[in-house]
Structures are given as structure tokens and as C-alpha cells.
Image: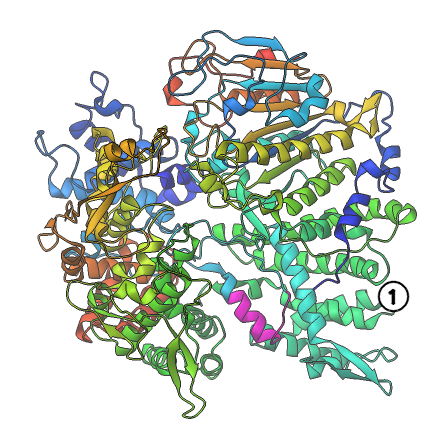
Amino acid sequence: MKAFVLFASLAFAANLSAASSESEAASARRFVADFCVRCHGQDKQKGDVRLDDLTGDIIAEGTRWAAALDLVRDGKMPPPESKPQPTAAQRGAFAAWGVRQFGAHAQRKPNLGNLVPHDLLFGPAAGAGTNVAASAPRLWRISSEAYAGWVEDVAKRTTGLVPPFSASPERGIKDFAALGRVDEPTTEILLRNAEAIVEKQTAFELADGKPRGKFDAVREFVELLRPDAAPTRDMLEKAVQKQFSLALARRAEAEEVARLLALYDRCATGGNHVLALRTTLTAVLLRADAIFRAELGGPDGLLTPRETAAALSAALAHRRDARLFEAADKGQLTTRAQLAEHVRRILDDPKIAKPRVLGFFREYFEYGQAPEVFKDRPKDLMHEPKQHVADTDQLILHLLAQDKDVFRQLLTTPQAFVNVRSKQNKQTRLDEFVPAITKSAQNNKGQAIIETLYGLSEWTAQQPITQPAGARIGVLMQPSWLIAWSENFNNDIVRRGRFIRERLLGGTVPDLPIGVAAMIPDDRDRTLRDRVGSATKDERCWKCHQHMDQLGLPFENFDHYSRLITAETVLDRAVTAANVDKKGKPMGDVFTTAPLNTTGAIAGTGDPQLDGPVKSPHELVTRIANSDRARQVWIRHAFRYYMGRNETLADAPTLQAADRAYLDSGGSFKALLVSLLTSDSFLKRGFLAGP
Amino acid sequence: MNPAFPRRTFFRGATLGTGSVLLAPFLQRLEAAPGTPAPKRIVFVVEGNGFSPAQAQPKSIPRAKHPYGHTNVDTTEDLPLAGQELSEATAPLAPFQDRLTVVQGLSGRICGGGHSNNFGALGAYSGKAGVAGETIDLALARALPAIFPQIGLGISDRPEHTVIYNLSAIGADQPAPTRCRPDLAYDEFFGSAAEGAARDKFAQRGNLLDFMADDVRRVTTRLNGEEREKLGHYLNAYESLRTRQGQLNELSASLRARGPAVTKQFGSSVEADRLTAMFDIGAASLICGLTNVLTLASGCGDPYFSVRWTGLGVPLDKHSIGHGKGLDDKTAEQLTTLIRRFHMEQIAKLATKLQSVPEGKGTMLDNTCIVYLSDSAESHHSRCFDWPMLVLGDLGGRLKTRGRFLCFPKYAAKGHRTTANFFLTLLEAAGAPRKSFGVADPGLKDLDTRGPIPELLA
């Protein structure tokens, strides 16, 4: 809901809502009048909500419309027992109007993609008679990682640069094309970085009056660095072309060269032509097309071959793929088959780094946050969140290498990597696993090693291990995920639940309302389940918490360090109070156990494959892993990551094709990626006219 | 990286207390011609993790509180601060007690509370709404133009952060930066005072900026709508930088004529050092006339609030302290007090510097107002029924804040006031009155909560 308030205040909201005509707004108002006003009007305002005065002005009335649309879409309002009830068609039309109104904005911001109803994307009627899937023409500011990769492409091994782009405050999948502003402080940093890069490219010393490049200086630049002789026009042109090739992988056009040489001339009037050259080379590195990747499309409404090469490179990695660019220049990057071949080539080549494959899973599961959760170091366990993250990385890479039934494996595999790092064996010259963290007798007295989290007493060379039945399965029971989704002193039942609701069930959860203090009581004599339950059971809280708590509760068989437990530990108040010495001074807390309760439920999806109580986290993740809906929701998230935007109703064909490609290939993530990256949504550029 | 260099030495030189050379040229600028309106400047010092009413309340004034802990008076308390004993946490401000007003009883329930109200703290809107609108510092900046409309400096919980967006906003979806690296902030504002080869570079920079502005403009003209706007920000950046460069250039000429050569240094990774450096840079930028609105953000915003004050001898992070965790020899309350006192000392130092620069018939401090608050209202997990503020300085006499204690009636009682009312008061005093600011608290819909606070206006 916060999103809608945000949209409402965007100055250019008016432009994009032009898609909805006045008569559609009137229909929406009629819906409200027919089905809502009876309880939310002048005479009665149930839940303190009044809707009879809505005019359809999304900007002024955003919060109330958003709430109404959410509830109608999810079938919660009007309440099932009230009459009359809207027909499915009426509900759909109302929801679709909302999606159109907010859709253009929802598309652009992370964490709002689920507002598009799942059934409209994957149901049989989806995609019928709608417009062709396409993205809007756009500029996508390069990410921090892509910037670092670009710096490597321009001047290898440059150190000491300042990261220019601030970390996104969004959670989950966050590199959206619509975000990513470059403002003054960022530009100042880009400027300084560019100057530092050029210093490195032109580092030289004089030997017999002739300039000699130092370290990794660029040969074509060094020739121009004679302090006593100004460079010729020809030499300058070559230098400019070289910088274009390094920074942009293309030749500069005549007009671009002319302007840069004019800059050189202006700078060289003082006689310092070395500085003038450096300034000119710096200007190339600051060009808009170096900082913003263009996806504007050509006259045929598709990404141009060069744009395609850049987009595919950026989809999978942070460095340019030279062969993609060569193919583009030769006119061999035009058919879907050619694109698919390149994608497969990159995916299959172990020598090509593809950080954005694992990157999707990192952002989707967020297990990489584990080291960010501040915790006391336990006395009896080595708490090593960074290693747990590395182990989960290995597991996911392993599942991707096998590339079978990937989604189900992610959630239910009994395999795990335990405390590994990769090292080259000096004899065989092959990479093998060795223990990453070894216990130090001095620093880790009495602390159990991390292998004990998996029921092992020591490190094993047989990696990955396969855990016995009833132990951990899947990413959601990996220590990294459990710790990432925990708090300082407890598990984070509510946010785990929200994760599952949003990223696996495709639901939405409204944001914390105004004036609510979201605090769990601290009573140490009660289990976390009990404490969270008492905080959220009030009717006003349960309205939202019903979507979350029951999904997070099954994981209570792990403590917040991710240890498997068989009973809860709670403070025994009576015994503690009685635990005093002869003088009456308290001698310390005494704990007792409480029975473990891992029950929960999946509810509200309307999907018979999913809804129902669960007895354990195993039952929960297994049911989700076997569900079509959950798999499709996962695919929706992959769409968002690789497209840099949320899906709209027009993308239904792309999503359905991706799901089919995944299923037909026996659950191959590579097949899924190929499908997404050769889809209309990825390649076509046009203005969306709505569903 | 840059050559190492005793930054501390430099920064001490850059501040007023040692009669720095940086001042001399500006003293002349600041001798206003008769009839020109006196300058006004506002400083916001925002500290994360809450400022409890208990820590704000002078020791000698009893505090009526509700069983839940929040302020509980029925009519406005209005007492002189003279003769009162400040709380331990705010005691370092005692030398300025005659210019200080302690304001209790304001609420900010619209913000929602939690670990931080993020942009909502200074924007008077929901802390969970993201960058939903302008914040008070940038609103005031519109009324108090200068070379830099506003300068945002501060620290986050991580030394490697360069620029974060956590507290200030120019408008909806337009956050303003909080610079977290003192060395980079120094370069940005004082780089024009360099010499020699570095000075040449500064000059060439002008050519480069002109070129880039032109270059980016050409691309912008080929785009439409939002994409054009996106690139427009990049274009504006170059145009702004160019304009500023020109302005800084003017200043640098007199700096160089009278000042010593200066060089730059690494930032320290110790948070107390960084914040001290930021206060120094902030003071210098006010004194040099670079800006009239300064925002100093100390560990504000989620997730930047959990600063670990190792430089003050506190090995615990603020999140744990906020949850009641203490050390063997100090309780959580004592640790919070210690950390807050450090901030008060910095404010006192800033006020002292401003006080030693003559301006008009008095000093710079006479025309300044320093506001201290937390982005997390009254506690680490705030509920925003209370939002204590300290106001030091009366903005050239436009505010009635010389040595007072004010406590407004409790939430929803007649006469109750919100942070939005307080912000409107500042706007009025700055000569830019408005009818409303931020989003109204629906919980107070039966009260008239419009307009500034008359008790605070001269």
C-alpha cells in the first residue's frame, strides 16, 4: 500500500493514467456503489473506512482505492456472507481497472509485482486477445556490480575507486530499470573515478625523452604523452577511438570525434597537452551511454543488435561478452535461434563468469543477508554466517549444474554443502573441496563446529552430503536462510511468513498501518510462537497477520542460530524467583523446556494443491515445491530479475512460455533462462497500451 | 588512493577556534551593508535510535507521565530555563542554556514509529512510505538559498558507505544525499582551495563539465517522458556542478591568496572521528557561506541506525543498546546518555564556532537555529506519541527560544501539537509560511492542528 501512496505523489502520474477512460472510472465507482457503500458509506463506516465519496482520482484517493482493490482481488471483500456478491467477471474488471491505474507504476518498483493477479497471468484466459508483450523503451542505469565490471573492461586492475551508486534500500529483487538515478554527489564520484581511471590508462615515465607506459597503461595513449611534442590530429583520433572501444565497444562517429577534439583544443590552449588529453579521455568515460544502458529499440520495435548484445551480456554477467558484440556487428544476432545459441553458449562455458545466475537466487531467497543479522556469539557453537552463505551458494550452483527439477530441488533437496571452499590441488591441478573454517582450540573453546548443525561430528570430503530423512531439506532450512530471516534474539516468524506469502505463493501483504507499534512481548517464560500469537491475534492485527504467521511458525524446530532443536527452552519464572542464596540474592535464571510445536497452515491461496494445515516445515516446503502455482510465482520473480521490471498482464504469454519451457525440459533453469531472454518481453520495445 | 596526511591537523585548522585563515575573507563578506536583511541559517542534528522525554527533561522540572510513559499534561507548561538543571544527557549544552529551548509533548504519530521513521521523520509522513515528499530541511532550503541549497553530512553504521539516502528529501521520489565520507565531502566542498597541479585540474574541470553538460543534453533531446527525466537528473548534475564550480572558484581566489596550502586525507574508520569531521566540515561550510541549511545525520534511517560507537568506548551496537543490553559496568540507559552527550558536545562546539564569527551587530550564532531530534522519535522502537526537540538559537529573533522549557498538552488533548506544527513554525520564522506540511495525523482529526506554534514565534 505504501507503493500507492508513493505513486499518488509522483508528478507524472497523470500522464500514465491516461490509459483509463472516464467510463472505466465510472464503472469502478459503480462497483463501489453497488458492493461497498452499504457498509462503508455515509450511514455506516465499518472498520472506519468510508468509500462513498471516492471519485476515481487515484492520486488523491490512492490509499483507499489500493485497499479496496487488494481486498476485492483476493475475494475478501465484500465479505462472503454479504449479498449481493459481484460476479467473477465484475471482480475481474474491477481488479483489472486497478491494475491499469496502478499498473504502469507498479511495473516499475520492486516488491509490487504480485499486485497483478496470478490467475490473470497463468489462467486459461490469460493472454487471449491482449497486446503483445513488450517492455517500454528505457535507459537502465548500470548497477554497482556492472560498473565494477565495466571498470575492469576499461582499465584492468584499477584500484582505489569509490563505489558511486548507493545501495538500494529495496528488499529482494531490486535492480529495476526504472530506478537508478544519477544525481550530483554520484556524478561527483563518477567524475573522480573517471579521472583516476584515465590516470592509470596514461601512467608513464620518461626514458630518453620518450614516454614509456607504466603498469597497464594503454599503448595508444602513451604515444601521445611526450611533454615536448604536441600530438597530431591523427594520433588524437586514434586515441579517442581506442577509448570508445574500451568504454563502449564501438567506434566513435565522426561528429563525436569532432566534438571531443574541440574539447582537447580548448584544454590545450594553456600548453599542457598531457592534461588536455587526459581531460578528453575522461569525457568519454562519463558519457550517458556508459552509465545508462540504452534499450530504446530500433524502428522495427525490437532491441537493435548492439542493444541486444549489451542486454544479454548484462543479463548474465557484469562484463561484456565479446562474441555477442562481434555477432551483433556482423549482423548475426537477429533471429531468436541465434540469441538462444549465444545464451546457451554462455551458460555452458565454465570459463565465462556468470554472477547474475547465482545473483537471482541470492536476491530471491535473500540468504546472503545472514551476516547482517547482529547476534551475540553463542558460547557453545561457532556462529559463522558468512560460511553458511558460501555453503548455500555451493548448493545452488550444484543444483543448477545438475539442472533437473530445479525448483523442487531448491525447496526439498536433502543435499547440503558443509563448510567448504574450493582449492586447487597442486598435484592433480583440479579444484577440490577443503574445509573452509577450522576450529581453533584457543579461540573456540567449547564451541561446537558448524558441521554439528548438520548432524556431523567432523568435516567430510564427501560433498555434498545427503542428510537423513527428517533433517534439513532445501534452501529454506539452510542455516543461511534461517539466520538471514531471524532477528537478534529470535526467529523472525512474521517475515519468514511474508517471504513465503510473497515469493512462493504470489500473495501480497499490506504494509504496517499508521500508528501501529509492531513489537513482540519479551516475556522469556513464553515460547516465541506464544508471544507472537498474543501480539497478532487482535482482529485488527490478524487481518494482515493471517497471511504471514501461519507460514513462518512451522520453522520453530530451529533456534535462531539455525540449530535443530527438539524442545523449546523457556525461563522458569517460579524456580528462578526461588533460586536465591542464603542472603536472598538471585543466583541466576533457571530454564525449563516447553514442547515443540511446528504446526502451521497454508491458507488463502484458493489453490487446493496448497491450502491446508501443515505439521512440520518439511510438509510445508514439500507441498509448496509440488505446487504449480508456487513454481509459477518463482518464474514471475525470475522474470522480474532478468527484465528489470515487474510483469504486466501483457507479459502473460512470456510467462506461460517460460513455464512450459521449464516443464518440457524436465525442470531446467537454463531452458527457463533461454526462454525468458529470447522472449518478446525481453526483446520488444513499445509503449504498453494495457491488457 | 590519496597520500596520507594528518587530517585532524587540517580540520583543526579549518575551524574557528584556532582563528583560522579560512575566516578572513568571509568576515568581509559578512559585514552586511546597512539595510540588507540578516542571513538565516538552520542546522538539523538528527541522532538515530530515539531521544526519550526522560533524557530531554531538565532534572529540576518534574515530568508528569502517563502509565505508558508518554507525556501527560493537560495544559501547556511554559517555564523559563534559567536556573534549571539540564538533564545529564543534555548537560553539555549548559553554556548555551540562555539560548536553548527544550520542547516536550510534540507527537508525530503519522510517522508510524519503529526503528526509524526514515524520511517521514523530517517529512511528517509515514516512515514506511519511502520518499513520499519533501523534508523540512529541504523545504527551508528553498527559502534560504545559497551556493548549496542544503548540505547533508553524517555517518552510517558502515565506514565504507560513501553516500546514503536515509533522511532528507527534495520531493517525492527525490531523496537528498547524506554524505558519509568526510574525505570525499571535503573534496566536494573545499576542493577549489587546492594549489599547483591540483589547481590546474580544477580549471580543466570547468571545461570538462561544460562539455559533459552539452554531451548529455544532446542525448536527452532524443528521448521522451520518464527516460528523458532520468537522464535529465544526470544533466542537471553537470549543470549544477558547473555553476557551483564557478561560485567556489570565486571563493577559492581569496582562500588561496590568504590561506596555507591544504591537502586531503583518508577518512578514519572510527565513527566518532567521522562524525566529528562532519561537524567540522559542516561548520566550515556554514561559515564560508556555502549553505544556509545543514543536516547532520548520525546513524539515521533503517538500516543505518545500528552504529557501534567504538570511538566512545562502547563496543555494543545501538540496536542492542536499544533493546536494553548494557555492559558489565554501564546500563543501556547510561550508554545512551554517554553517546548523546557526545552529540551535545559536538553541537556546543558548533555553536561556539558560530558565536566567534561576527555578523552584523552580533555573531553568526545570533542568526542561526540548531534543532536536535531523533528520527526515531522518543525511543529505539518508537511509537511517536512524544518527540522531544531541542532548539538552540532564535534565528535572528524570529523565534522565541531564548531559554525556555515548553511542554505541550498530551496527545489528542486540546492544545496538543505535532512535529508538523513545529516544522511550520520554522518555515514561518524563515520567511516562508505555509498552511500545511506533510500528512495530517488522522488520530487527531477532531483537533485543529493547523498552522505554526504561536508560543514559539516572536
Can residue B51 be seen here?
yes
Q: Is residue B419 visible?
A: no
Which residue in the rendered view is the most extreme toward the right? B257
Residue B314 on image: x %, y %: 56, 43
Say what amino acid the circle numbered 1 marks: Gly
Find numbered disc 1 in the image and state the secondary structure of the residue it sits on: loop
Left/right placement of residue B392 relative to residue A364 reads right
Q: Is residue B90 above or below residue A193?
A: above
Does the stretch in magenta take in A159?
Answer: yes
Number of disc labels? 1
Asked if residue A518 is positioned above or below residue B427 in the image, the reply reads below
> Which secondary structure dominates the residues rendered in magenta?
helix
Which residues make up the magenta segment?
A: A146-160
Report which residue position mark 1 lands on: A270
Callout 1: chain: A
- Residue A141, magenta (yes or no): no
Which of the two residues, A8 or A622, is positioned nearer the viewer here? A622
The C terminus of chain B lies in which quarter of the figure? top right
Q: Residue at x 62, y 32 (%)?
A: B341
Q: Nearer the viewer, residue A84 or A548?
A: A548
